[in-house]
Structure formats: structure tokens, C-alpha cells
């Protein structure tokens, strides 16, 4: 979503994210490739690659030997996988993986129609219904994801075949919606942000014009989907065109004040809006983005960085409605919030945007994938009770263990592409200033812009110390290093070569300007004291409860560590919370927290008139991102407090 050169020029070293980068390369991408080819035993069928094969066959011979299978947006799973593979290839060149990607890209090209149109659902299943169901059919959404893959693959490998394919599709879309004046805008936004990426990569003005077109027409005719439904006479799944908030078309985008509707659609739209505002200087659009971002983060975001409170519609609901055990909290939505926040950083350089990126990344997004990289959550609740979660009618969506794959598998490849491109969010280069947004150990080559390399050495998020080292091409690197000051750190210490720095602190960043040589070290130490988090009294679900945070990590209690019963536990008000030593063998390496608390006597009667007795106990807490890696288990983030 930003400067893809940073991805190519950043080499992650061993450490927390080093493990994830290698996991993506060695496990996640191969596993997901097998899933896309229906080769995972016991997993939901994907059929993605087969859909492209059938589309190519039909274009060549006029018929195909099978039927389209999967969701109407099944093509997007292949696109996101290719994008993740591209980023991984930039970190870890792999001739075999690249060859397999090239084969898939060749197949995609064979599935493209002569006029540039590309979509296997319509080529195989509904050839006469192109562009007649923008509300449901996800044509523009699929195109957007494939555009993103094309840009990433070209930037990371230098190969432009997929880019050429998607420029052809983009030109087709431009002709249909701009030159021929077709009405409408995508039911699922994604094309807007993708076209901005295509514009940044190619410099072709019509791609920016097309992105702005879809942004500007959205909601102007808020009845478009009603009118479209009346004309088309067919449906994918009977979506309601009357619910205008669901598709963020209730009013034009510059007039939108609250984040509403399908959470992923919303943040994808807002990401495109923010990127367009950065590019055009449109202050009205920028103000709308700020208003929407504030509404999300102040009223509609979980402490884990998750968004989307309701299963019904995978959607935002109302301000301060944040139920824990029925939260939808889709992995893709947290990823979209990172995209949106990343673009907001380019609009206004303020640490609060990176704080939210970090919150969503280290908690909700990482929780969306099992530690071994082979199972995934779509939904990320903050409380789980086996026997209710995943079983009760109201909780069917809150699965207590991760499945191997999904019928709707948007989240797994989304996690892969985000983790493989983390450098794009960790570092920003803006007008000669290098911004360190996320603290990921590795070396960034900024020779072209700053005359050398900058290395970050750290064991974050379990260690509070960062060291920035410099490798100038000549004697010195004249530069400004801007280091984010996390809001959770009460006191942050910054030193240059061991001496306290009086650097300028502004809007959540510390600015260190100077000439840095090979012997210079910038040291940053955060306050990682354990903190209790409380919500506003407006959030009814958390009345009388606290969450526990250390550094960027939200912690939770799991039954396996607490006598298989977390419901009887409460934190002692003002009780001590101690930090374990680093446990390298537990959950791929964590630090546990041990909180003073109480365990209440469990009554066999549903209701009684006796005050429950409570015995002091120690509550063990683990990082939220590690939950559900030890079998069927209770889990709770927000714990009751008592004296």
C-alpha cells in the first residue's frame, strides 16, 4: 500500500518477525498453494486454480469439462496468494516458487478475454451477465486484488506479464465505466486502492482517474443498487439493496461520518480514499478519512485492533457496541485497518496511526493464523467457551479452534501477503526522513536516498530495547531518523552513543537529526511495565472488567493454564502482575504474565442467595495471538476485577 521498494530493500533478521517471514516462505505459501489446488486432505475445497484452467479451456474451445466452483470472488484467493509469494521472493529468491508463480500467471493470461476482461465466474458460469450485478458479483473486487498482485509481482521480480494482463483489464474497466459512461460502483470496494497502486507503479493517469471516478460516484445515486436489481433479474445470494449502509453508499464518501456496514468493505474503501487524498491534496476527502478513522478507533475497535462487531453482515454495528463472545472481528478487517492506518500516516504524520497498525498486527492479525502456519481463524472473538462457541446458534461463527481452510477463504492468503510485506508498514521514507513505525529486526538499504543502510537490532515485542546501527556508503549518513513513541510506553528513553538525546518530540515521533557513522548507535528503551486496560463505561460488555497489556501485546487467560476454568477467575484490584522469563519452547517463544487474583466457588445451582466464596490464586496469562494453539480451550481477554 506504500513504497514497495522498502519491501525489496528490507531484509528481516532472526527474531520475532524473522520466524514469521520464514514460516510464510517455508510453510504458509506451500500449504496455501496446495489448498488452492485442492490438495489438503480434510480441508474445504478451493478449486481456484481449476476455475482458471476451465476458463482458459472455454475461451480456447468454446466449452469446458467442469463447472465453476466456489464463491463468486474465488479468483481473489489466487491473487492474494500471488501477491504474498511476490513479497516472499523479494526476501528469499526461490527459482522453483517463481517458476510455479509464472505458470499460474500464464494460466491467468489464457483465461483473459480478447477485450481484456478477466473473471472466471463470468467466463465459465455467467458469460452473458458481465457488469450487470455490481452489488453482489465482485467483478471489480477480484480485479482489484489481481491488480495488487500484478504490481507486487512486477516490483519484486521485475517480471511484467501479470502487470500487462491487469493493465488490459483496467483499460477494459476504464472504457466501460468512463468512456462508455456505465453507471455504478463496486459493491465490495477494493478496486479503488488497487488502481491507486497501479497508478503509482505505472504513472498512467487514467488509472488514477478511474480510481477517483469510483470514489467520487459512490453514494451520489444512493439508489443505484435498487435500480440495478430491478433491471438484472438474477442474483448471487439475494443481497438486500435497500441496506445502503452495508455497502457504504448511503451518502457520498465525503459526507460519511461513521464507519458502517461490512467492515472489510469499509476499510478497503477508506484506504483508497486516503491514498487518493494524499495524491490529489483533496482536503475534504482527507477530512472524511480522519473522521472515519477516529470513529473506528474511538468507538468501534476492539482492544486487539479487531473491527466488525456483528456476524450478521460481517459488519460494524453501533458506537461502543463491542461484545466479546459474539465478536465477528474478521482477520481481513484488521488487515484492512492496517492498510487504512498506513495511508493515514502519509496524510498526517502522527504516531497514533502506527499505534493502531501495531495493535491490529500483533494481536488480531497474528491470532488469525496458527503458530505453525497451517490453520486459520476467520473470526477472532475475545471470549470463547467450548460447548457454546461454535455450537450455540448465536455463536456458530466463533470457532474455538482454527480450521484448515474455508469455503470463503479470503483471510488465509490475506495474512500471508501482509506478513510477507511487513516492511511496507515498518518503515516510511518521506522527504529525506526515515520513519521507524514498527519495530522489526532487520536491515533497510536506503543507499539511493540516504547513502547507506540502517539496521534495527531488537528482540521486540518481548524486549524493550531497540538499537539502530548505521552502515554509511561513505563516512557519514546525513539524515533524520524518526522513531515512534508508542502510547503504551509511559516513559521512553532515547540515547545516542550512550548519552541521553534531547531530540525533538512531535506528534508521537522522536526526530533525531545528524550525521551518523558506522560507530554510532541510537538506543531506544520503552517502558514495558504491565498495564491494565479499561474501556469507557459506554461499552457495556466490559463493565467491571480489565484487560492486561504488556508492550504492544494484549494478554488473555486460557483454561489449559488455569485449571480448565477461567469463568470463576477475577483479577485482584491493584494486585501484582509479574512477568516470566522468556520461554523459548512455549508457544514458539513467549513471556507469560502471572496476576494476583481470585477463584470463586462454583455453585451447582443456577441462582442462589449466598455471596460466592473466593480463594486467592495466581492467574496465568498468555499473549492473545497465541490462543487456541493447544487444543479445545476456554479463553477470555476481559477479566472481572474485585477487591
Image (tube, helix red, strand yellow):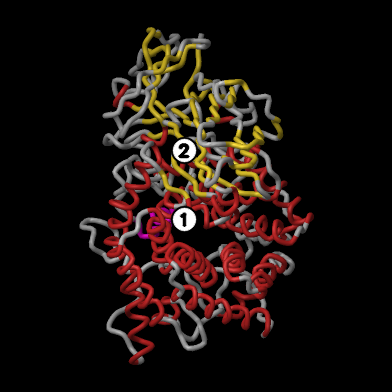
Disc on res. 109: none
Up-down relation of residue 51 to residue 573 (above or below): below
The picture quadrant where one finds residue 284 is bottom right
Label 2: which secondary element: helix
Q: Position of residue 195 (x, y in %)?
A: 59, 68
Q: Position of residue 1 (x, y in %)?
A: 56, 56
Query: Label 1 belongs to which residue?
Result: 8
Q: Does 9 appear in magenta?
A: no
Residue for point 33% across, 80% down: 54
**Can the viewer see residue 309?**
no
> Is 179 positioned to the left or the right of 542 in the image?
right
Q: Nearer the viewer, residue 39 or 639?
A: 39
Magenta residue span: 406-414
Secondary structure of residue under mark 1: helix
Q: Residue furthest front?
A: 475
The answer to which of 185 and 350 lies nearer the viewer is 350
Mark before the other along the chain sequence, 2 or 1: 1
**Measuring 42% from the left and 69% from the top, which residue is drawn there?**
75
Mark 2 or 1: the one toward you:
1
Up the image or down, 45 lies above or below 28; here it is: below
- Bin the neighbour count of mark 1 within 10 Å (Cα to Cα): few under 14, some 14-19, many 20 and up: many
Residue 98 position (above or below residue 606): below
Q: CA distance from mark 2 to mark 1?
A: 22 Å
Does the magenta-highlighted stretch encompass residue 413?
yes
Residue 142 falls left or right of residue 224 = left
Q: Quadrant of residue 602?
A: top left
Q: Which mark is residue 362?
A: 2
Amino acid at each position: 500500500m506504500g513504497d514497495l521498494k522498502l519491501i525489496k530493500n528490507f531484509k528481516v533478521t532472526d527474531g520475532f518477525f524473522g520466524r514469521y517471514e520464514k514460516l510464510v516462505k517455508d510453510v504458509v505459501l506451500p500449504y496455501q498453494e496446495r489448498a488452492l489446488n485442492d490438495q489438503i486432505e480434510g480441508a474445504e475445497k478451493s478449486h481456484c486454480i481449476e476455475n482458471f484452467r476451465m476458463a482458459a479451456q472455454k475461451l480456447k474451445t468454446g466449452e469446458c469439462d467442469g463447472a465453476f466452483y466456489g464463491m463468486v470472488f474465488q479468483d481473489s484467493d489466487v491473487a492474494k496468494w500471488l501477491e504474498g509469494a511476490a513479497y516472499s521472493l523479494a526476501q528469499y529468491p526461490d527459482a522453483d516458487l517463481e517458476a510455479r508463480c509464472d505458470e499460474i500467471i500464464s494460466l491467468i493470461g489464457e483465461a483473459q478475454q480478447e477485450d481484456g476482461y478477466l473473471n472466471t465466474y463470468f467466463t465459465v458460469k455467467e458469460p452473458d451477465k458481465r457488469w450487470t450485478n455490481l452489488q453482489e458479483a465482485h467483478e471489480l473486487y477480484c480485479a482489484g486484488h489481481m491488480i495488487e498482485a500484478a504490481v507486487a509481482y512486477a516490483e519484486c521480480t521485475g517480471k511484467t506479464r501479470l502487470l500487462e494482463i491487469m493493465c488490459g483489464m483496467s483499460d477494459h474497466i476504464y472504457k466501460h465505466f468512463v468512456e462508455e459512461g456505465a453507471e455504478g460502483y463496486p459493491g465490495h470496494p477494493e478496486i479503488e486502492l488497487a488502481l491507486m497502486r497501479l497508478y503509482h507503479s505505472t504513472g498512467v493517469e487514467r488509472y488514477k482517474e478511474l480510481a477517483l471516478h469510483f470514489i467520487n460516484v459512490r453514494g451520489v445515486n444512493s439508489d443505484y443498487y435498487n435500480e440495478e436489481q430491478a433491471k438484472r433479474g438474477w442474483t448471487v445470494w439475494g443481497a438486500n439493496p435497500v441496506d445502503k449502509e452495508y455497502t457504504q453508499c448511503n451518502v457520498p464518501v465525503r459526507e460519511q461520518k461513521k464507519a458502517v456496514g461490512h467492515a472489510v468493505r469499509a476499510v478497503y474503501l477508506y484506504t483508497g480514499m486516503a491514498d487518493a487524498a494524499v495524491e490529489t491534496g483533496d482536503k475534504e476527502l482527507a477530512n472524511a478519512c480522519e473522521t472515519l478513522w477516529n470513529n473506528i478507533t474511538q468507538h468501534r475497535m476492539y482492544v486487539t485492533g479487531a473491527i466488525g462487531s456483528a456476524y450478521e453482515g460481517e459488519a460494524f454495528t453501533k458506537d461502543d457496541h463491542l461484545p466479546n463472545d459474539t465478536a465477528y472481528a474478521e482477520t481481513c478487517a484488521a488487515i484492512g485497518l492496517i492498510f487504512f492506518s498506513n495511508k493515514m500516516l502519509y496524510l498526517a504524520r502522527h504516531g497514533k496511526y502506527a499505534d493502531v497498525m501495531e495493535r491490529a498486527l500483533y494481536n488480531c492479525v497474528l491470532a488469525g493464523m496458527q503458530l505453525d502456519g497451517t490453520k486459520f481463524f476467520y473470526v477472532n472473538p475475545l471470549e470463547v467457551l467450548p460447548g457454546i462457541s461454535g455450537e450455540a446458534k448465536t455463536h456458530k461463527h466463533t470457532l474455538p479452534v482454527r480450521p484448515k481452510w474455508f469455503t470463503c477463504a479470503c483471510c488465509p492468503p490475506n495474512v500471508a501477503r501482509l506478513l510477507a510485506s511487513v516492511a511496507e508498514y515498518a518503515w516510511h521514507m518521506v522527504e529525506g526522513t526515515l520513519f521507524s513505525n514498527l519495530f522489526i529486526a532487520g536491515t533497510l538499504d536506503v543507499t539511493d536516498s540516504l547513502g547507506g543502510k540502517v539496521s534495527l537490532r531488537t528482540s521486540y515485542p518481548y524486549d524493550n530495547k531497540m538499537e539502530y546501527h548505521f552502515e554509511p556508503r561513505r563516512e557519514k549518513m546525513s539524515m533524520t531518523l524518526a522513531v515512534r513513541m508508542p502510547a503504551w510506553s509511559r516513559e521512553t528513553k532515547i540515547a545516542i552513543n550512550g548519552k541521553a538525546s534531547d531530540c525533538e518530540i512531535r506528534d508521537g515521533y522522536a526526530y533525531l537529526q545528524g550525521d551518523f557513522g558506522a560507530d554510532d548507535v541510537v538506543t531506544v528503551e520503552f517502558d514495558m511495565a504491565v498495564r491494565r486496560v479499561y474501556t469507557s463505561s459506554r461499552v457495556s460488555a466490559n463493565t467491571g472488567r480489565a484487560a492486561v497489556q504488556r508492550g504492544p501485546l494484549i494478554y488473555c487467560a486460557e483454561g489449559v493454564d488455569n485449571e480448565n476454568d477461567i469463568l470463576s477467575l477475577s483479577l485482584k484490584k491493584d494486585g501484582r502482575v509479574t512477568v516470566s522469563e522468556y520461554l523459548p519452547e512455549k508457544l514458539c517463544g513467549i513471556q507469560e504474565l502471572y496476576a494476583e487474583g481470585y477463584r470463586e466457588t462454583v455453585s451447582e445451582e443456577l441462582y442462589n442467595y449466598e455471596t460466592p466464596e473466593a480463594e486467592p490464586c495466581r492467574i496465568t496469562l498468555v499473549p492473545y495471538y497465541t490462543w487456541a494453539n493447544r487444543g479445545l480451550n476456554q479463553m477470555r481477554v476481559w477479566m472481572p476485577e474485585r477487591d
